[in-house]
C-alpha cells in the first residue's frame, strides 16, 4: 500500500491527497477547464503573432503589386501600419541571409527597406 501524499491541484491550487504520482488535479472536473484555458491561451497568443504577419504581408503585397522590387523608407512603411520586425523565416536570398515574409524578401538599406518578391520556379 502506497502512502498518500498531498499535492495541490494544477488548476486551482486546492490541496488533495493521492497515492498516484501522475495525478495533478483534484478530479476530472478540475482538469478540463484548466486544459481549455491553456489551449485558449496558446491559440490567442498564436493568432496575436500571426495577425501581425498577415497584416504586414498584406501591406507589403499591395505595395509590391505586380512589381518584383520596391524601395520604401522605414518611416513610410511604419506609417502604413506594417511591422518592420516580422518575418516568417530567414533564408539565403541573393547571397545574403535575408528575412523573408512568406514570399517577400525584406532587405534593410539604411533608412529604407527594399522589398523583393521571390521568384517562383
Ligand atoms: Zn483544481
Image: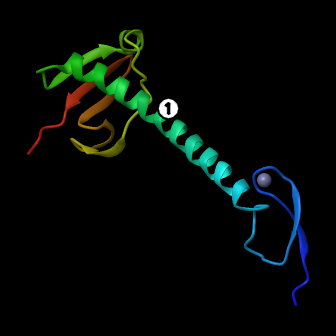
Q: Quadrant of residue 83?
A: top left
Residue located 24% across and 44% down the image: 95
When the figure is inspected, residue 62 is found, relative to residue 104, above or below; the finding is: above
Left or right, 89 with respect to 103, comes to right
Quick one: label 1, few (<14), some, or many (20+) residues within 10 Å? Answer: few
12 and 83: which one is in front?
Answer: 12
Judge whether residue 108 can be spotted in this image.
Answer: no
When the figure is inspected, residue 30 is found, relative to residue 105, above or below; the finding is: below
Q: Position of residue 66 (x, y in %)?
A: 11, 21
Residue reaching furthest bottom? 1
Quarter that holds the N terminus: bottom right
Residue located 59% across and 41% down the image: 41
Q: Quadrant of residue 52?
A: top left
Q: Quadrant of residue 25?
A: bottom right
When the figure is inspected, residue 115 is found, relative to residue 8, above or below; the finding is: above
Image colouring:
rainbow
* Residue under pointer 1: 48
99 and 44: which one is in front?
Answer: 44
Quarter that holds the C terminus: top left
- Label 1 residue near ligand 1, CB within 8 Å: no
Left or right, 102 with respect to 12, comes to left
Q: Position of residue 81 (x, y in %)?
A: 41, 14
Residue reaching furthest left? 121
Q: Position of residue 85 (x, y in %)?
A: 44, 29
Q: Position of residue 5 (x, y in %)?
A: 90, 74
| Mark 1 residue element | helix
When the figure is inspected, residue 5 is found, relative to residue 30, above or below; the finding is: below
Residue located 42% across and 35% down the image: 50
Amino acid at each position: 500500500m502506497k502512502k498518500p501524499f498531498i499535492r495541490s491541484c494544477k488548476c486551482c491550487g486546492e490541496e488533495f491527497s493521492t497515492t498516484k504520482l501522475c495525478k495533478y488535479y483534484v478530479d476530472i472536473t478540475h482538469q478540463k477547464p484548466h486544459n481549455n484555458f491553456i489551449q485558449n491561451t496558446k491559440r490567442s497568443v498564436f493568432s496575436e503573432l500571426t495577425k501581425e504577419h498577415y497584416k504586414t504581408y498584406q501591406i507589403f503585397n499591395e505595395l509590391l503589386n505586380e512589381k518584383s522590387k520596391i524601395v520604401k523608407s522605414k518611416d513610410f512603411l511604419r506609417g502604413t501600419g506594417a511591422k518592420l520586425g516580422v518575418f516568417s523565416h530567414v533564408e539565403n536570398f541573393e547571397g545574403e541571409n535575408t528575412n523573408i515574409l512568406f514570399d517577400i524578401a525584406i532587405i534593410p538599406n539604411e533608412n529604407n527597406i527594399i522589398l523583393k518578391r521571390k521568384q517562383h520556379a
